[in-house]
Image (tube, rainbow, N blue to C red):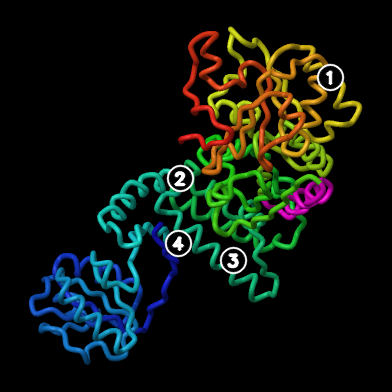
Amino acid sequence: MNAAPYVVAWTLAGRKVVVVGAGAIGTAKIELLLDTQARLLVIDPTPSDRVRELATQGRLTLRARRARPHDLAGAELLVAATGSTATNRRLRRWAKALRVTVNAVDDRANCDVTVPAIIRRGPATIAVTTNGATPAGARFLREELTAVVDEALPPETGAVFEAAAHARAELRHTGRYRYDYARWRHGFFAPAVSALRAPAPPRHRRQLIDQVHRRFVAEFEHHRTDAELGRITLVGAGPGGVDLITVAGARALAAADVVVYDRLADPELLSLAPPAAERIPVGKGKGYGTTQGAINATLVERALAGAHVVRLKGGDPFVFGRGQEEVDAATAAGLAVTVIPGVSSAVAAPGLAGIPLTDRRLASSFTVLTGHKATSEHHAAEIDAAAAGGGTVVVLMAATTAADVAARLVQAGRSAVEPAAFVHAAATSSERVHHTDLADVAANGCPFPAPTVMVVGPVAAPSSIRGERGPAQVPAPAREQAQPIGR
């Protein structure tokens, strides 16, 4: 995996920047650098007419000759637009001796930094970079994204950001400024962009933006309105693999200010959230971890502070996930809550292991139980009911209580030789499957640690055995005590 670049905005105003190469590509780089107000020194024996014109206007210094080492003295940045790897390599040696940062156009091996393709809206800049892998690709993305940005934020959006800069300066001057994103979003940016989209002449739209500016500064310290309260989104993370989250769940993560996540959620899912989003682990297991009350308090606290809080829960929030308790806590605090279902491991884990929960030749129904508190009287009654039902039994969180569940199923009438299967870490690289029967489970328990799903019933037999009663419906692994599933 290639290292990701750390993208920064570099202020070059008044600093010396040297551009070696003033052909078509070098000239394009110079046009970009002009807006930085850097002191530009351009070196090329045969510069373009545009560069000669800029030199005549006094906007840059031109030396129509080959570059020399002393040209780089005192420079902050060297842009090598020579088209020659050998020349770039030589320039880089000179630059390193003088501690000058190098950008070699379309020559990543000789770069200290790469320059992104950009979309500008006033003082706001959107950067698109491929880390130097394909400059043409970065430009292509910029061109494609410009149309999308124009639809959402037209070129006049620059006026909104300029007004925001003035508002920030005024608040700083009076000592009232603070970074409160929810207040800025709902009190300034949302109404200002709405004003920009108003069906009115440009001059009138600018007046509307000015009104938003004045009202925002005047009312900055007022209490937050209901519209400025944060919100909570419960997202089902699916059974494990990052690719099994729903599209809606991925979109919610992309818009999160805070992510409160379970230990069963794939860690890679956190990369879907913005880099600035706060990430809070609240992993729980049998006998340890963050209490549900503490989780509820965290969700409410962050949302009341104005954040969009995404509660990322393994599987589905409402399948043994205490999701309703979190909804109730948020509702009691007056917060808006959205629930995005997830793919439950109750159906996903067996499916990924090639175990059909229902096969009309073997089972027409299935029951889902939790392995937690399996020995309690209430849960024992549920196990008895599942045993009497005769369908497939799926037990979540079965790693430590499988033996008790199996013994209770046999006691309730299930055959001791009835097939059972365990699926560990479904949808991950650690996925394992174990086929056995209830007698073995009652004696030896689960062969895997959490997370593990237990399946009981004729469908839990290996496909080769199921096939004796009819053709197997899905491919399954060869029969072994414990083996990985090919992905």
Calculate the distance from the C-alpha at mark 1 to the C-alpha at mark 4: 69 Å
Local SS, label 2: helix
Marks counted in the figure total: 4
Residue 471 image point, x, y percent = 48, 11
Of the image marks 2 and 1, the number of the one nearer the N terminus: 2
* Residue 53, image quadrant: bottom left
**Residue topped by disc 1:** 411
Amino acid type at circle 1 is: Gln
Of the image marks 3 and 2, the number of the one nearer the N terminus: 2
Local SS, label 3: helix
Residue in view at x 31 percent, y 86 percent: 75
Segment colored magenta: 287-307
Calculate the distance from the C-alpha at mark 3 to the C-alpha at mark 1: 73 Å
Local SS, label 1: helix
Which quarter of the rendered picture does the N terminus lie within?
Answer: bottom left
Residue 199 image point, x, y percent = 47, 41
Instruction: State if disc 3 and disc 4 touch (CB < 8 Å).
Output: no
**Residue topped by disc 3:** 167
Of the image marks 1 and 4, the number of the one nearer the N terminus: 4
- Which mark lies nearer to you, 3 or 1? 1
Amino acid type at circle 2 is: Ala
Residue 233 image point, x, y percent = 67, 41
Calculate the distance from the C-alpha at mark 2 to the C-alpha at mark 1: 64 Å
* Residue 50, image quadrant: bottom left
Of the image marks 4 and 2, the number of the one nearer the N terminus: 4
Is residue 346 within the magenta segment?
no
Q: Neighbour class for label 1 at 10 Å: few (<14), some, many (≥20)?
A: few
Q: Neighbour class for label 4 at 10 Å: few (<14), some, many (≥20)?
A: few
**Residue topped by disc 2:** 152
Amino acid type at circle 4 is: Ala
Calculate the distance from the C-alpha at mark 3 to the C-alpha at mark 2: 23 Å
**Residue topped by disc 4:** 124
